[in-house]
Image: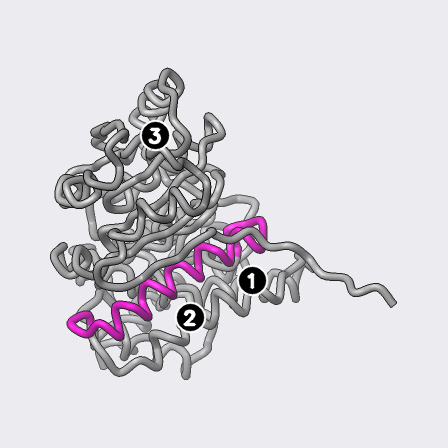
Amino acid sequence: MPLLTRSVQAPLTIDVRRGAIASLGKLLADGRVSAGGEVAVVVGPGQGEKIVELLAPTLRNAQILHVAGGTLDSALELGAQLRNRSIDAVVGIGGGKTIDTTKYAASRYGLPMVCVATSLANDGIASPTATLDHDGARPSYGVHIPLAVFVDLDFVEAGPEGQTRAGIGDILCKISAVADWELSNRVNGEPIDGLAIAMARSSAEALINHPGSIADDGFLTSLADALIMSGLSMAVAGTSRPASGGCHEIMHAMNILRPDHGSHGEQVGLGGLFCTYLRGDLDRFEQMSAVLARHGLPRVPADLKLSIDDFVEIVQYAPRTRPERYTILEHLGIGASMPDAELRSRVADYVDAVLP
């Protein structure tokens, strides 16, 4: 009997530790990606310049490009610069905006991309998507996953603590995203992928059950691993479903209706907790709420400087951000058949459940 398997794309190298970036030059040579170091190094604001200084002795032929990323226009501009250069690969160094900008530009011109992450704010580190601002919205675009991923804990530790905490919220919401996907499977027969679900769920479980904090190397390593695993779960599934459900619909609506209220991870963490409450999974709700509270992350609208009325409007709008997606929000008829008064009552009950 033939053995039937599937091939799964994954980075050539994943290196999470202190001093990890010192191995980048060796990877490029050993992996025969660019033995001569003829690469473009894309640097964002922040700690990128320090990393470039460390890499200089091993990447003497590198071409340094500076970006203020995060928008589709900046990614297209970077792509135009890459197109006119003779390079073997692109190295993106920085936070989420720089990484997403570099991923998009490299994918557009078929160039291998290496991710050197200086923050752990979201799962874009290794995902097949790039989220870029465009025309007042923040859509996600399909891209190739990175050839390699480096997370140097020295630079993560030196960055803003708020970004690291945000990554916890982004991972925790996978519990809700997976539940939404399974709900759609039961109700609509939408296909699910067991491997992708296992990867996404286990990434969240690793943090839920970890006793440490962002001050501990062990916890930071687990967070980085979880973010990478979550990103790869989307590559396995061929969709963002294992990592994005009603939690992300709420985030998208928040950025459209009430922009600049919290980071991505803070928004989806709150959204995932609210969706878990709506689902009636009270054991999970209490578990997630306790983890968010322990790490100082938002749990109620007021934590993001939003009123109850603001949040009701956001949740009502949320299903419109991904009309093709079925989550607990669509299942309950939010934004469609559910009366406004009922939604307002559910939001008030949710706040009472979080803050009894």
Give percent across and percent down for residue 76: 36, 23
**Element under label 3?**
loop
In space, the residues marked 3 and 1 are separated at their CA atoms by 35 Å
**Element under label 2?**
helix
In space, the residues marked 1 and 2 are separated at their CA atoms by 20 Å
- Report the span colored magenta: 214-241
Residue of label 2: 276
Nearer to the camera, 166 or 1: 1
Q: Is residue 238 magenta?
A: yes
Badge 3: few (under 14), some or many (20 or more) residues near its Cα, within 10 Å? many
Q: Earlier in the sequence, mark 3 or mark 2?
A: 3
Residue type at mark 2 is Thr
Kindly give the residue lying farthest to the right in the view shown: 1
Q: Earlier in the sequence, mark 1 or mark 2?
A: 1
Residue at image location 22% in from the left, 63% down from the top: 18
Q: Earlier in the sequence, mark 3 or mark 1?
A: 3
Residue type at mark 1 is Ala
Badge 2: few (under 14), some or many (20 or more) residues near its Cα, within 10 Å? many
Reply above or below: 223 against 312: below
Q: Is residue 172 magenta?
A: no
**Element under label 1?**
helix
Q: Which mark is on residue 196?
A: 1
Left or right of 294, for residue 149 = right
Reply above or below: 354 against 78: below
The main secondary structure of the magenta stretch is helix
Badge 1: few (under 14), some or many (20 or more) residues near its Cα, within 10 Å? many
Nearer to the camera, 184 or 78: 78
Reply above or below: 334 against 40: below
Give percent across and percent down for residue 37: 33, 34
